Image (spheres, rainbow, N blue to C red):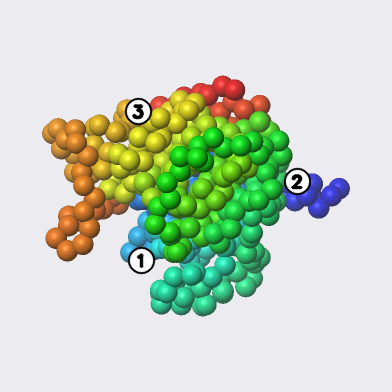
Amino acid sequence: MTQRESSAHSKLFSAISLALLLGVSAATAQAQETLEIYLIDVEGGGATLFVSPAGESLLIDTGNGGQNAARDAGRIMAAMRDASVAEIDHLITTHWHGDHWGAMEELAGRVPVRHFIDHGPSIESNAGVTEFLNTTYAALHRGARHTVVTPGDRIALAGIDVTIVTSAKQVLRRPLRGRGVRNRYCADFVAQREDNGENAQSVGIVVEFGDFRVIHLGDLTANTEYELMCPNNPIGTVDLSVVSHHGQPTSNAEVLVHAIEARVAIMNNGTRKGGQPEAMQVLFSAPGLEDLWQLHFSQLSGQEYTVPGLFIANTVDDVQAAMPIAPLTNTRGQGAPARPVHNGQAYWIKVSAQADGLFTVSNGRNGFTKAYRR
């Protein structure tokens, strides 16, 4: 028996044992033949859980910290329980912004994390992040594995191909197998102001399970999207796109969004974070897009640029008698209204994918499920 086969058998035994503890039959646990993906509501932060058919787990980002760390770690653990996994085999931190790593210490104190993955040290001058990386993070991965990844690296997840396509502002140069055709959207790209911060450093991945393909690029911004996708498209097309940067217009350039021709997109936005009209117009006009799903109703979209409520996992706490049609302006600074705080019941969006390319997307709030065939 190979080391990978031994690991898969161990995972299967653990999954069956946990399933029995949770009241799920061993036959049900053993019969899982799908890749499960949970887009977890961490209030405009990032937390996406992948669980392979063999029961191995990959978590991308851990949500917010501070007073919200226990809340977001709890929401991640709720998804883990639903997926019948008791540990995180691989944890990717896309970049060092607090809405993406904030609950890491809280989560790692509750469940084992076996492998920590990142792009390297933060390039921003932030005393809090530096202290976390030098002390807490170093202690967390001292008893585990720690990998600084570069484009082209692979993550070993049983039965799933996971390829790093961006990291530390570097991009994949050798196309994925069968990809690499010229990208016709490159000619019309207009560069934005250069992003010299952490967003452009984001670790991005492409996940392949048989004929099913997913892209997740963290908070990658537009100029680095161009570097990745031009002159040739090394990614090809995908079935599912996790919308970059919470659906903000500093990311999500046509050169990426239109070229990958995602059939379904899921936006991990907040009530007043992401979903601005400029980004929504790019998403809605993307070739081949059948549906856009959102973790939150976006007040920055208003009624004009949003999707039907069936496709939105979380609404707003301060429900108005009539929602304005026009989008709100995302004002910041002194005198700006505070973003709504949502600490009540949170709902995820769950994807279940088969190796033949068929997949379903489900809304945890209302139970709405839609199947997407090849």
> Callout 1, which amino acid?
Gly
**Tag 2: amino acid:** His
Taking 223 as reference, is 319 left or right? left
* Residue type for callout 3: Leu
- Write down the residue under mark 3: 310
The local secondary structure at tag 3 comes to helix
Q: In this view, does 183 lie above or below 75?
A: above
The secondary element bearing badge 1 is classed as helix
Q: Where is residue 17 in the image (x, y as percent from the top left)?
A: 65, 46
- Between the C-alphas of marks 1 and 3, the distance is 32 Å
User: Which quadrant, please, contains the C terminus?
Assistant: top right
Give the residue at x 51% y 23%: 371
Residue to which mark 1 is pinned: 66
The residue identified by callout 2 is 9
Nearest to N terminus: mark 2 or mark 1: 2
- Residue at disc 2, secondary structure: helix
Give the residue furthest to the front: 187
Label count reads 3
Looking at marks 1 and 3 on the same chain, the residue that comes earlier in the sequence is marked by 1
| Residue located farthest toward the right when viewing the structure as drawn | 1
Q: Residue furthest top?
A: 373
